[in-house]
Image (tube, rainbow, N blue to C red):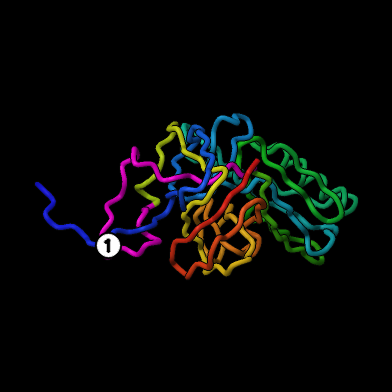
């Protein structure tokens, strides 16, 4: 069936395309998982020839008050690994840790149980907190920590972060089968993350120097900082999405990048990168 109707005005920019013809550097890495166009990529830790989307790599678990005699604390450690490019999460429910001797001793006992979970690199207790670090290329989160018994019960809070190494932006590739684009589709949605993406193992064109079109989560003003998402927050849930805020600690600021122009909410705009 032949196409017999054409738009007079073609879309001049969409997610993942190069912003202009200025000098640019594009490197090639293997896709460690399915990777949509126009998102921030992270270098693999164990295998630096691969890239993946960012994720939680460190958590600080904090008690609101010191634990007391009679307290019993339990919680869940969630470990996510890429298995043949597919994220697989295993949740381990920790057995209850009963208060013993004093709060630092009890906190250390909880940390030891967290550290024993496969996929956790370390868990260190100090000053009312437990700092948990994931193993290479593994994401770890904590949930359901609660204290029962005793004369009073502490509550627990979590602060997630990442130390992933920013590798660049995943560029649009005509060799990848693309989602259908219609004239009624908003610009920011023209690349469907669920169907337009690099398959696992493909060579990912990764922009490390130059400009690329991205779809930030919020409106951008010139001079705003650049953040990338590593966990779900109020403004979005897509790992690797760009924005201008930490969104409650679910995004991390990156350097050697800048917004070229203001970007309206829901629109596509230019991000300039200058990585070494």
- Would residue 44 appear left or right of 122 to someone viewing this image? left
On screen, residue 275 above or below 8: above
Q: Residue at x 51, y 38 (%)?
A: 26
Q: Residue furthest front?
A: 22
- The quadrant of the image that shows the C terminus is top right
Residue 107 is situated, as x and y percent measured from the top left of the image, at 81, 50
- Would residue 167 appear left or right of 120 to someone viewing this image? left
On screen, residue 78 above or below 27: below
Q: Is residue 200 magenta?
A: no
- Would residue 37 appear left or right of 4 to someone viewing this image? right
Specify few, some or many for label 1: CA neighbours under 10 Å numbering under 14, 14-19, or 20 or more: few
Element type at mark 1: loop
On screen, residue 227 above or below 141: below
Q: Can you identify the residue that label 1 sits on? A: 9
Q: Residue furthest left?
A: 1
- Would residue 113 appear left or right of 33 to someone viewing this image? right
Number of labels in the image equals 1
Q: Residue at x 63, y 66 (%)?
A: 223
Residue 153 is situated, as x and y percent measured from the top left of the image, at 77, 64
Query: What secondary structure predominates along the stretch shown in magenta?
Result: loop
Residue 23 is situated, as x and y percent measured from the top left of the image, at 53, 44
Q: Residue at x 67, y 36 (%)?
A: 135
Residue 186 is situated, as x and y percent measured from the top left of the image, at 35, 65
Between 68 and 26, the one lying in front of the other is 26
Magenta segment: 165-192
Q: Residue at x 49, y 32 (%)?
A: 30
Between 183 and 152, the one lying in front of the other is 183
């Amino acid at each position: 069936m032949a196409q017999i109707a054409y738009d007079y005005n073609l879309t001049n920019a969409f997610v993942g395309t190069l912003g202009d013809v200025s000098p640019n550097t594009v490197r090639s890495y293997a896709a460690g998982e399915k990777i949509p166009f126009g998102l921030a990529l992270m270098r693999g830790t164990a295998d630096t020839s691969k890239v993946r989307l960012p994720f939680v790599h460190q958590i600080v678990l904090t008690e609101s008050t010191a634990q007391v005699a009679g307290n019993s604390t339990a919680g869940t450690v969630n470990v996510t690994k890429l298995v043949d490019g597919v994220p697989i999460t295993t949740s381990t429910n920790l057995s209850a840790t009963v208060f013993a001797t004093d709060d630092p001793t009890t906190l250390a006992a909880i940390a030891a149980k967290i550290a024993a979970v496969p996929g956790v690199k370390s868990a260190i207790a100090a000053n009312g907190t437990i700092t948990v670090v994931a193993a290479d290329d593994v994401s770890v989160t904590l949930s359901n920590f609660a204290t029962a018994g005793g004369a009073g019960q502490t509550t627990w809070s979590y602060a997630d972060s990442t130390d992933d190494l920013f590798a660049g932006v995943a560029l649009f590739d005509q060799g990848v089968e693309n989602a259908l684009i219609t004239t009624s589709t908003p610009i920011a949605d023209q690349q469907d993350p669920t169907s337009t993406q690099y398959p696992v193992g493909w060579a990912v064109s990764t922009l490390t120097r130059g400009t690329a079109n991205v779809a930030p989560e919020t409106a951008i003003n010139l001079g705003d900082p650049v953040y990338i998402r590593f966990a779900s927050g109020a403004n979005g849930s897509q790992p690797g999405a760009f924005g201008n805020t930490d969104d409650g600690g679910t995004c991390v600021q990156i350097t050697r990048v800048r917004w070229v122009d203001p970007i309206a909410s829901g629109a596509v705009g230019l991000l300039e990168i200058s990585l070494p």
